[in-house]
Amino acid sequence: MTPRGKIVRGVLAAGLIFAAAVTGYALRASRAPAGATPIVPTAPRAEPSPQHAQPNPAPRRALPDELPQIPFRDRHGHLRRFAQWRGRPLLVNFWAPWCSPCRAEIPLLEHLARARPQGVQVIGVAVDARPPVLRYARHAGIRYPLLIGLQPGMRAIGALGMVAAFPFSVFVDSRGRIVTVKVGRLRPAEARLILGRIGALDRGRIGLAAARRQIAAGMASLAAHRAKQTPG
């Protein structure tokens, strides 16, 4: 590992201690979901004391309508923006190679990238330095497009109004509209539900508001079912 990489990891690891106290970056939830690893957000603001702060305080703004067009370098060093994939539904997965839940969901993302249900394009946004990302991508056999960079990644997270908790996945319809965000490890049933509703949306069978309502209801049902299956 390069000295720079060690410094980046040290900063990110230290940020775990107080990231839960940061306001303005959460996504519509009062508690951090299981399977999401928080990191340090960009430009921290004045904070309440950690002992009085909720793990994921209420967001200051809603999700934007579309993905931010922040330039990233891909694994080959080429400059890329999300707009280059416009015209197809997207699953944009924010992750880091040191994040255990991120690593655990990569086989599912690879399966989705190959199978392309509803025509989805999977894109990974690796929020870390290039060397560890490229090493892990080779080790894990990641073949879907990767956009890489700590600074642009954190800018994109801030533009989305999100807390920097990995992994999280942004789902976009073929018109470029953000439909929903899944925070924490994506499960196969959740992917089927979300992509199924996006497919119906893209075919004009339902509207955007209805797709979001159906996804929210379905995700709540899946979460309740998982809770019943978990011992204790």
Image: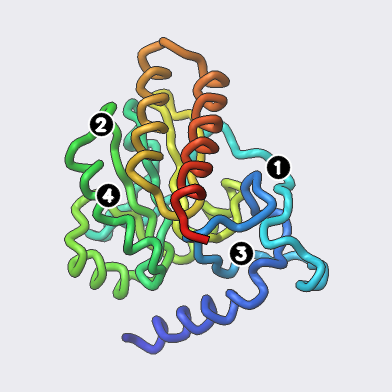
Mark seen at residue 61: 1
Q: Nearer the viewer, residue 231 or 130?
A: 231
Q: Residue at label 2?
A: 117
Judged from the image, the secondary structure of the residue bearing numbered disc 3 is loop
- The numbered mark, 1 or 4, whose residue comes first in the sequence reads 1
Say which residue appears at 67% left-offset and 74% top-offset: 18
Q: How far apart, in angstroms, are the residues tagged by discs 4 and 2?
A: 12 Å
Rendering quarter of residue 5: bottom left
**Relative vertical location of residue 79 with respect to residue 213 in this rendering, above or below:** below
Q: Position of residue 165 (x, y in %)?
A: 53, 60
User: Residue lying farthest front?
Assistant: 232
Judged from the image, the secondary structure of the residue bearing numbered disc 1 is loop
- The numbered mark, 3 or 1, whose residue comes first in the sequence reads 3
Say which residue appears at 19% left-offset and 53% top-offset: 143
Rendering quarter of residue 11: bottom right
Judged from the image, the secondary structure of the residue bearing numbered disc 4 is helix
Q: Nearer the viewer, residue 199 or 9?
A: 199
- The numbered mark, 4 or 2, whose residue comes first in the sequence reads 4
Q: Give the class, few, some or many, for how many residues have Cα within 10 Å of label 1's Cα (few <14, many ≥20).
A: some
Judged from the image, the secondary structure of the residue bearing numbered disc 2 is helix
Disc 1 marks a residue whose amino acid type is: Arg
The N terminus: image quadrant? bottom left
Say which residue appears at 66% left-offset and 66% top-offset: 20
Depth check, mark 3 against mark 4: the one in front is: 4
- The numbered mark, 2 or 3, whose residue comes first in the sequence reads 3
Mark seen at residue 181: none
Q: Give the class, few, some or many, for how many residues have Cα within 10 Å of label 4's Cα (few <14, many ≥20).
A: some
Depth check, mark 2 against mark 1: the one in front is: 2
Q: Residue at label 3?
A: 42
Q: Position of residue 19 (x, y in %)?
A: 64, 69
